[in-house]
Amino acid sequence: MKSKILTVDDSRTVHILVKKAFKECEVDILQAANGVEGLSVAAKESPNLILLDVTMPVMDGIEMLTRLKGDPALKQIPVIMLTAEGGRDAVMQIAKMGIRDYMVKPFKDDVLLEKVGRIVDLNKKAIEKTILDDINILLVEDKPAIIQTVQDGLKHLPWSFVTAGSAAEALNSYNDAQFDLVLMSLSLPQDSAFELVKQIQTVRKKTPIVGMVVKSDSDRQHRAVQSGFDGTITKPLDMGELEMRSCRAMGIDTSPRYFKFEKGYLLVIVPQIESMARLGEIRSFVSSKVTDAVDSGYQKVVIDGTGIKELDVNLIKLIIDITNAANDMSLKCTIVGNETMRSEGNNFQESKSWKVYDSIEEAVAE
Amino acid sequence: MEESKPFNADEIRFMVEHALKDVFKTMLSIDLELKEFTTMKEGENARSPLSKCDGALVIGNVGFVGRVSGMVYTAMTDGLARKVAMEMLGMSNSELGEEHDLVNDVIGELTNMSAGAFKNQLCDRGLACRLSIPSIIRGKYFVVEGSSAEFRQIYVFGCGEELLTFELLMKRDEEGGDDGQL
């Protein structure tokens, strides 16, 4: 649930500045122009915090503060003064009335955010990452062999790992750094994984947590769902599956790996596919990316199959799907490949007629 | 600053310059430059140094009352006021619109902050006082009559290519009446 911050100030300028300061946070900003309005909004909305000016018409900040503190329903709402009144005596007098902090104008956004952030959860909006961005992962696993497997299996990505062999070690690491993902074994001793999840969520609610659990352990899989894990993956681990579930949990856009908008054409990179999951992943983006290409005025799609080492019926179907999607939107589609694609393509009815270019430049020029 | 002595013009100038520069730097990332300041004699009046500029002037006014009482006026051209409002609010000219209301509010709040930053320094020197609510005047020619002011200074600041003025009138409350306690 979003935090609510009520600003009470007769200046529209201050309202706009406060709203701007919190634009990256998931909070609701409420506004009032004087103490009378402020009390009314506070009673109705029960804000998590009030930012209060002193000098206002109708009812000033001091009177509003006095009435707030005298109302059993409102007195617990924390108040930060945000005012040009900053003489030492004034600050001391108001501080005695039970405020949480005092900010003298002029003010900087980062100072305001820091002071407010000490009192309410600002839920800063996460910057959307893609598969090409650096990711920091806390890997909680007491079996060194699995740690090694995960690190080796994901080393082709710009992901870095901090490892922890126990719940206590994991919590220490979590408190010390920001992570994009927590990968956690559900087989930690004494079922400590489930307690650890609660403790992690107390520190910072927004980090996604994926559990690693033995395939046959349906009880722990069920408990993971109940405990607030964002997903689970079964052991023995399939690295393609682990990568996909981790990306999904983090809300990572993996399409930049396969789709690039170049000068005048959409390049679709079709790699050697090891798993149906990866196939499904690429296929899930085709329609939207082709639509984006049309919206952006592109007229051509180039499929780059130079990374394919072995052509099979699944890859052929994928390439056909991409071609059809392009043709349906009146985009010309060409294929760049290698000798494998030409020779193995001849073995399949569907790919016999493909014209495979040697380079992207030739395919674009067509 | 001892209460029995007249206001120290240099000390006041230092406080005003510090206040204005801090406000404009913090809220607008603008470095003001003090071009000139004039200490007016009692009863002397002067037309605004900006009255030769084209177009209307926007003047923000805030008072303070307590052991020392006074008024401050910040004045700038309408063009500068709009630029300042756009910068402070992060708005384009079209977003700001043709109406004066929001520009007036920005100048009023800047005046409030400037007056506060100045008079808080007085408070910390034992001259407790509190601010009034700001008001805005728009016009071409304006003259401030400071008939009862004990101390009066006009500051001219460079703000980029343009000028703004800050006028300060003050007098001490001899009877030590309202001590500015809230």
Image (spheres, coloured by chain):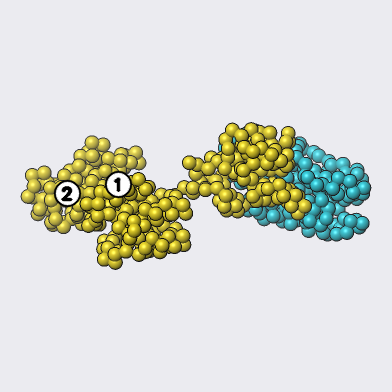
Q: Is mark 1 on a helix, strand or loop?
A: helix
**Which residue is identified by label 1?**
A222
Measured from the top left, where is residue A310 in percent x and y? 14, 55
**Which residue is identified by label 2?**
A315
Chain letter, colour cyan = B
Q: Crowding near pointer 1: few (<14 within 10 Å), some, many (20+)? A: few
Which circle's residue, 1 or 2, is located before the other in the chain?
A: 1
Q: Nearer the viewer, residue A84 or B99?
A: A84
Above or below residue B95? Residue A345 is below
Q: In this view, does A305 lie to the left or right of B132?
A: left
Q: Which of B43 and A167 is in front in this view?
A: A167
Residue at the spot x=83%, y=41% of the render? B143
Q: In this view, does A163 lie to the left or right of A110?
A: left
Q: Which chain carries label 1?
A: A
Residue at the spot x=64%, y=41% of the render? A75
Residue at the spot x=76%, y=54% of the render? A88
Chain letter, colour yellow = A
Q: Is residue A176 left or right of residue B181?
A: left
